[in-house]
Image (spheres, rainbow, N blue to C red):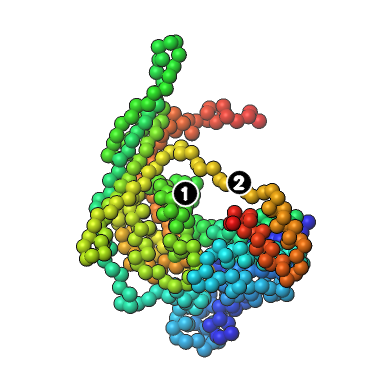
Amino acid sequence: MDDVQSVLVRAVLDEQWRERFDADPAAAMAEYELPAAAADALIGGDERVLALLGGASEVPPSPAAEPAADPPPELPPVELVLRLVPELVDNGAGGFAVRYAASLHGSRPPPPETGAAPLDLVVRVSAWAEADGAGGLRLAHAASLDVAGAEPHPSPAPPTGPDVRSAVAAVRAAGREARYDRLVELAKLLEGIP
Amino acid sequence: MTADISIVGLGVCNVDHITRQVERAVGRAREVLYVDTGPATRAWLAGRCSALTDLYAESYRVGGVRADAYRHMAVRTVEAALDHAPVCFAMFGHPTVGAQAPSLIASMARELSLTVEVLPGVSAMAALFADLLLDPCARGLQMYEATDLLLRARPLQPDVPALIWQVGNLETRLHTDRASRPERFDRFVRHLRATYPADHEITLYFASPHPMMRAQVPRVRLADLRAHAHRLHHGVTLYIPPVGIRPIADPHLAAVVDDPEHLGRHTRSS
């Protein structure tokens, strides 16, 4: 274990050393001969510590090393709101019926002061220009729909039955060397993987 | 009664978050199989259990399917429990947040008549609530896994705070440690732009993974996200603050929420 790793482990497991570090970081670190950059990072406690923790991909590269390409131009997003307001109306036979009043808006209108709460279906459309692969630009767009009260798709039922029982029996019958493979088969069955 | 398998969370700040409850489970296990790359994790576990298995090193490979890694973790844990229970599966963070292995362990254990307990750990979400002073009861909270958000084109409510998980693993189920290119986030930004303005400030949150490193909370404009691709590693969670306030939809309820008579009608007299 090198000195950097020793410091990282000690900071977690040695409470007294950690208190000394919190009180005077430079003095506590003087017990170690660390590269200056590593010592600075540990005393600073910033994102440079990530590299010392082993997150190689987490070291920010020099901006000059990989400049970001210009983002494609965007067009203003558009929002459309379809508002449905339920109403109780006389059905002409002594009872009531429900009907909906529908209206279209360019943005979310305030709620009505009286009556039932409205149902708003909000469509948001965004458009942008993107490279067409031939040096030019083409128009693309995407939309999202906020639908209140949408019925969820039913979840698949967990697998049961003779296949699972057979897989369990195979695990129990397997010797130590074969047990791993039988457990993988059981796991895949429970995951629904053919 | 001791469970055959204890599934426990080690928290996100290398040992500092471990609860007494988890410490007891580790101490009584005959083997601890763990997924946590913190520098002090193994040393801490070794002080409490003599048989340790580093499942991170065993399970992940660059370009490998992450689901295969999770299955390997589950199978190795159940295999150990069949041989010498009780065992402990210990993982970074909270064991049922952003992890498939625990639920698969539980499913396999149920079929094999092994008992399981699940003990919580401090997740990045709990750390985020503290670091950003975010109260999910105030304006609600919506959260999605980044790739799932795109796959299903899930709608976002602009007036509700949003957490987007695993943005560093965007658009893949394969494992890699390599840094992302800016273009990786174009589709993602377009999806967010359907709900949020270009200059909306979002936080690239990374919980403190070690006592010597503070939580990282840089804020960037949504339109500039691609320029920060190198910072969007697999541990980063995006916090998107709300835009606007949803108006009251039920004025009748709003009129009585501070009314003692209304409360009296809904509670027993003593």
Q: Inspect this view and state whether residue B120 appears.
A: no
What residue do we see at 49% from left, 74% from top? Answer: A55
Establish if B168 lies above or below A87.
below
In this rendering, is residue B56 above or below B152?
below
Label 1 neighbour load within 10 Å: few <14, some 14-19, many 20+: some
Residue A41, disc: none
Disc 2: host chain: A
Q: Secondary structure at mark 1?
A: loop
At horizontal 49% and vertical 70% (from top left) the residue drawn is B63
Residue at image coords 42%, 71%: B179
Q: Position of residue B42 (x, y in %)?
A: 64, 74
Q: State which chain disc 1 sits on.
A: B
Q: Quadrant of residue A92?
A: top left
> Does residue B138 appear left or right of residue B226 in this picture?
right
| Secondary structure of residue under mark 2 | loop
Say which residue label 1 marks. Answer: B141
Q: Position of residue B153 (x, y in %)?
A: 41, 50
**Left or right: residue B152 compared with residue B110:** left
In-front residue for pair B63/B12:
B63
Q: Nearer the viewer, residue B226 or B132?
A: B226
Q: Residue furthest left?
A: A136
Q: Amino acid at mark 1?
A: Leu
- Tell me if B167 is positioned left or right of B190 in this view: right
Identity, as a three-letter code, of the amino acid under mark 2: Ala
Residue B43 position by quadrant: bottom right
Disc count in the image?
2
- Compute the Cα span from label 2 to label 1: 29 Å
Residue at image coords 62%, 66%: B72
Residue mark closest to the camera, 2 vs 1: 2
- Figure quadrant of the N terminus of chain B: bottom right
Q: Residue B203 location, x and y as percent?
A: 40, 60
* Residue placed under numbered mark 2 in the picture: A157
